Image (spheres, rainbow, N blue to C red):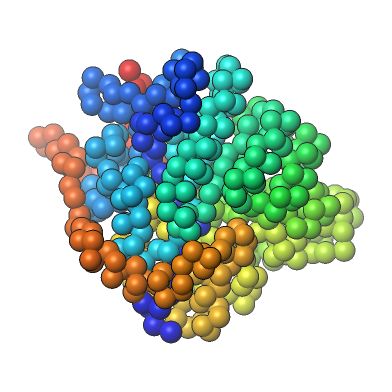
């Protein structure tokens, strides 16, 4: 196998939704009261819904910019590549990057629909959440059958509605849902509460994947406001270990042995020690913690290897140590359009990391594991030779896809006498606070 022979399925990318998001899926009062994309006097985009305002659907959607212009911008759709919000342009950007198929998380209501939880009128929220799922599945994903893995969001503030939405999504062919890894941050019971039992049953009955995306519940911690931002970025993928440990000890996994959980954007290199530590802790403490209720006769590492899909962007160490993981539960992710994405050079970075593996292992981590886990049959729609890196890039060349960096003006110049300094966590938090004052 050579680089151009790979078939790559990315199980974590993102959309910055367009302003006509709800137009084809709602009418009358339902459409009039739906979230609206608006523009401030200074030219930045913001969404407004039920009296709440939140900024820029595109924070960190910097794909295609020069590196020196990376940051927590852009603040309007006009500053982004069209592929960030236009599905037809997204396909072109996937082709030029050698990506055969992609699972996309939303932005406007956060990765797991958390904005719908925060407003007062939950009846309206339910209407608009369902319409959002209709847009995602029936408009975005259905525009190019076989190129996207649909991923819905759930009204978890209402368990009856959640179960109904799982059934409705499954009927649409949706095989994944994104939920908050720590629902207590939204005022809901913890995952260890009986409140969630109907959802566990519905999810497993319909063989759907639960996607837990970093930052979707437990915030990635930073040491102080003076912590350099790169220190924070360094630990962001590993911060999912907090949620992973919580979910690993979920007693429902013992009762639902086929439940499937994806740790989206979490990486893999840290996992062998995580499992070793979990096994050690269980061995030393189970007699007084009664953790056998969750694990039975199994070790924590056995449960982890049975239930959790690991997703990586760039993880040479993890792939060199694949033997310590379940090689059937490791999948690639591109993270388009965020700053970690290696677009448009994913194959050039991925191939050196996987070429030491067997051909079967390469196929597993690049597409086969994702197809099996998410019940997604890419080859129902395309022959393998049509969706290899080489074939997709040939299409992109024929279409004239431009990948040259595009500047949006860059940062404001330094004041007279001001010297460059490292960006800190406090700077980023300040940017968020500034953007929160959208009006």
**Count of labels in the image:** 0
Q: Which of 256 and 436 is in front in this view?
A: 256
Give the image quarter of residue 360.
bottom right
Q: Residue at x 29, y 66 (%)?
A: 395
Q: Seen in the image, is 217 located left or right of residue 23?
A: right
* Placement of the C terminus among the 4 image quadrants: top left
The percent coordinates of residue 398 (x first, y second) are 23, 66
Q: Seen in the image, is 3 located left or right of residue 182?
A: left
Q: Residue at x 69, y 41 (%)?
A: 167
Above or below residue 378? Residue 115 is above
Q: Nearer the viewer, residue 244 or 374?
A: 374
The percent coordinates of residue 426 (x first, y second) are 38, 36
Q: Which of 114 and 278 is in front in this view?
A: 114
Q: Seen in the image, is 242 located left or right of residue 16?
A: right
Q: Can residue 306 be seen in this view?
A: yes
Above or below residue 50? Residue 277 is below
The percent coordinates of residue 164 (x first, y second) are 70, 35
Q: Seen in the image, is 90 located left or right of residue 365?
A: left
Q: Residue at x 41, y 44 (%)?
A: 15
Q: Nearer the viewer, residue 111 or 222?
A: 111
Seen from this angle, which residue lies furthest left?
A: 416
Above or below residue 411? Residue 293 is below
Q: Can residue 281 be seen in this view?
A: no
The percent coordinates of residue 173 (x first, y second) are 60, 50
* Placement of the N terminus among the 4 image quadrants: bottom left
């Amino acid at each position: 196998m050579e680089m151009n022979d790979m078939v790559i399925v990315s199980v974590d990318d993102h959309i910055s939704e367009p302003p006509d998001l709800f137009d084809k899926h709602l009418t009358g009062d339902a459409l009039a009261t739906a979230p609206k994309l608006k523009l401030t006097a200074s030219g930045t985009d913001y969404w407004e819904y039920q009296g709440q305002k939140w900024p820029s659907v595109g924070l960190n959607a910097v794909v295609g910019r020069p590196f020196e212009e990376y940051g927590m911008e852009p603040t309007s759709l006009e500053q982004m590549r069209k592929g960030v919000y236009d599905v037809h342009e997204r396909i072109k950007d996937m082709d030029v990057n050698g990506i055969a198929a992609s699972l996309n998380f939303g932005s406007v209501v956060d990765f797991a629909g958390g904005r719908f939880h925060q407003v007062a009128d939950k009846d309206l929220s339910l209407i608009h959440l369902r319409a959002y799922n209709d847009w995602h599945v029936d408009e975005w994903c259905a525009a190019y059958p076989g190129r996207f893995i649909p991923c819905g969001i759930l009204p978890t503030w209402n368990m009856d509605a959640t179960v109904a939405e799982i059934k409705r999504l499954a009927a649409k062919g949706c095989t994944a849902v994104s939920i908050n890894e720590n629902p207590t941050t939204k005022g809901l019971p913890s995952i260890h509460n009986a409140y969630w039992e109907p959802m566990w049953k519905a999810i497993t009955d319909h063989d759907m994947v639960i996607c837990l995306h970093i930052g979707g519940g437990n915030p990635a911690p930073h040491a102080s406001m003076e912590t350099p931002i790169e220190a924070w970025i360094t630990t962001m993928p590993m911060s999912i270990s907090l949620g992973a440990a919580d979910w690993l000890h979920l007693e429902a996994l013992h009762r639902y042995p086929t439940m499937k959980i994806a740790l989206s954007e979490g990486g893999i290199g840290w996992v062998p020690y995580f499992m070793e530590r979990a096994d050690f802790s269980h061995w030393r403490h189970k007699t007084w913690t009664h953790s056998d209720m969750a694990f039975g006769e199994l070790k924590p590492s056995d449960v982890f290897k049975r239930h959790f899909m690991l997703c990586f962007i760039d993880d040479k160490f993890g792939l060199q140590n694949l033997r310590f993981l379940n090689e059937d539960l490791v999948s690639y992710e591109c993270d388009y359009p965020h700053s970690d994405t290696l677009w448009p050079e994913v194959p050039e970075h991925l191939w050196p990391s996987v070429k030491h593996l067997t051909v079967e292992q390469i196929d597993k981590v690049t597409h086969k594991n994702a197809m099996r886990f998410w019940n997604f049959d890419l080859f129902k729609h395309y022959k393998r030779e049509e969706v290899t890196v080489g074939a997709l890039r040939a299409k992109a060349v024929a279409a004239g896809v431009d990948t040259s960096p595009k500047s949006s003006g860059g940062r404001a110049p330094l004041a007279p006498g001001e010297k460059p300094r490292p960006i800190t966590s406090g700077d980023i938090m300040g940017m968020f606070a500034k953007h929160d004052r959208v009006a």
